[in-house]
Image (spheres, coloured by chain):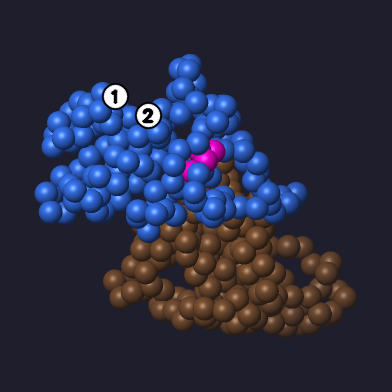
Chain colours: A blue, B brown
Amino acid sequence: MIGELRGLYERAWDSFGMPVLELRTDNLLTLVTRLRGEFGFTLFLDVTAIDYPERSPRFDVVYHLYSRSRNARIRLKVQVPEERPAVASLTGLYGSARFMEREAHDMYGIEFTGNDDLRPILLYEGFVGHPLRKDYPMDMEQPIVTYRK
Amino acid sequence: MAMMEYMTTKKDELVGWMRKFSLFPYPFVTACCGMEFMSVSSTLYDTDRFGAALPRFTPRQSDLLMVVGTVSHKEAPILKTVYEQMCEPKWVMAFGACATSGGFYRNYSVVQGIDKIIPVDIYVPGCPPRPETVIDAIMMLQDKIARDRHPIFPFETQLPVKA
């Protein structure tokens, strides 16, 4: 199956029985459309990001897809730079992508072009910053209720 | 005069007795400690024995606010509003490690102890606390309520506070 997708990804390896494909941002939408259409990966499990502060494309956006007909999962990794952390949005393909992308945007600041509803989903109004990035101090709190005493 | 003092201490004891054995908790349950709250309210470790059986799911009609579980910064204004909606006399129990001090969460989203927001009368540590711990806490709170003074005469304010 991975052979049929050759040309759309950079590297492929296996992680405990699950294929992992590393892609470039331009190929993401085509690849996911083919995975969803031809190969039956109809369940969109999660999108999240990994922050590598020392590496040049700073973020690694990771997608997990699941195929019910094949009982198989696949992981896709897209490297995005810090200056413009933009990835194509999968809201046209999967309905659940709306909320997942809102969370990834909230926590890491990844922009999903095509998803116009990137309101904060877990954080509250007045919160500044993206907390799961490595340069956000771990125990910095931004309280909205004034503390007593 | 000694008779007056005797009557007023008896009056305080009576009011304390009435209040401590008819607590109406408001279980402000947010997280896993809610499971322990359910188990302490049900038949094996009963809170009905202590009079604290009927939860009033509105703060306006309850007098014990049990903050059960983790309170995040997004939840904090809600907790403060609920506390302010309760009428006097009211007591607050911080149930569980997360409500007491933030628990094992030390990050951007968890309030490090609800006593930063509202005054707390009794803290119940544990993650989650054993039901026996909760019952012990209810009994300690009842002792605290029983020791409360309710002065109505001027001479009562000069009485020494019983330890």
Q: For residue A128, which numbered disc appears in the image?
A: none
Q: For residue A10, which numbered disc appears in the image?
A: 1
At label 1, which amino acid type do we have? Glu
Q: Is residue A77 visible?
A: yes
Same chain for marks 1 and 2?
A: yes
Residue at figure coordinates x 22%, y 40% from the top left: A74
Query: With A110 as the anchor, is B7 left or right in this view?
Result: right
Residue at the outermost right position:
B154
Residue A62 lies, with reference to residue A58, above or below; the image says below
Q: Are marks 1 and 2 in contact (CB under 8 Å)?
A: yes
Q: Position of residue A67 (x, y in %)?
A: 19, 50
Mark before the other along the chain sequence, 1 or 2:
1
Q: Which residues are magenta?
A: A108-112
Residue A109 in magenta stretch? yes
Query: With A138 as the anchor, is B46 left or right in this view?
Result: left
Residue under label 2, please give it. A24
